Image (spheres, helix red, strand yellow):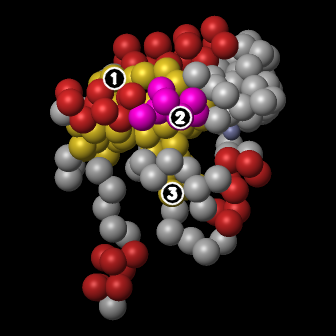
Amino acid sequence: MKECDDNRKRRRPMLRIERSVWNDMIGYCRSALPDEACGVLLGESGDETSTIRHWRPIPNRASLRDRAFAFDPAAWIRVWYEADAAGRVPLGIFHSHPGAPAVPSPEDAAGNGSGLPTYWIVSFVPQGGCDVRAYTLAESSNEAARYAVSPFRIV
Ligand SMILES: [Zn+2]
């Protein structure tokens, strides 16, 4: 029985984000209002902790940018190569919700994420406020429960 429990509760590394990245990410998303903004979070990944130390904006190429985001493909590839050359691990993507809470929208849930371990949403609802949540892809066949809220620390 114990083995089953251990399997189910497979430990994820503790997630940390540097305060400068946190501030820059929110500032960038705010500067893009009323459109959604998006980008990539990078850093170091270990067994015990994953720490986000860098970020890169990616232009939003969605046709309806106030309610959706789509990475500019060339910029996305460039960030990937840059990260590899610098020895930085892409740890997640972020995007903003100018007028919706920080929960994955049906479109977000329908997408298959980015293949990266974390998925961050910066919400500016209610007006003037800011709510940021990190998610990880949950292992579930239930579409609605695919993203699980992930605790994190600002360091
Ligand atoms: Zn979204």
**SS for callout 2:** helix
Real-space CA distance between mark 2 and mark 3, rounded to the nearest whole angstrom: 22 Å
Under circle 3, the secondary element is strand
Helix, strand or loop at mark 1: strand
The three-letter amino acid code for the residue at tag 3 is Leu
Decide which of tag 1 and tag 3 comes sooner along the chain: 1
Looking at the image, which is closer to me, 32 or 85?
85
Residue toward you, 23 or 114: 114
Q: Which residue is mark 2?
A: 73
Report which residue position mark 1 lands on: 54
102 or 119, which is in the foreground?
119
Against 140, residue 69 (above or below) is above
Q: Is residue 70 left or right of residue 81?
A: right
Between circles 2 and 1, the one closer to the viewer is 2
The magenta span reads: 71-77
Residue at 20% across / 52% down in the picture? 47
- Residue receiving disc 3: 137
Q: Does the magenta-highlighted stretch encompass residue 141? A: no
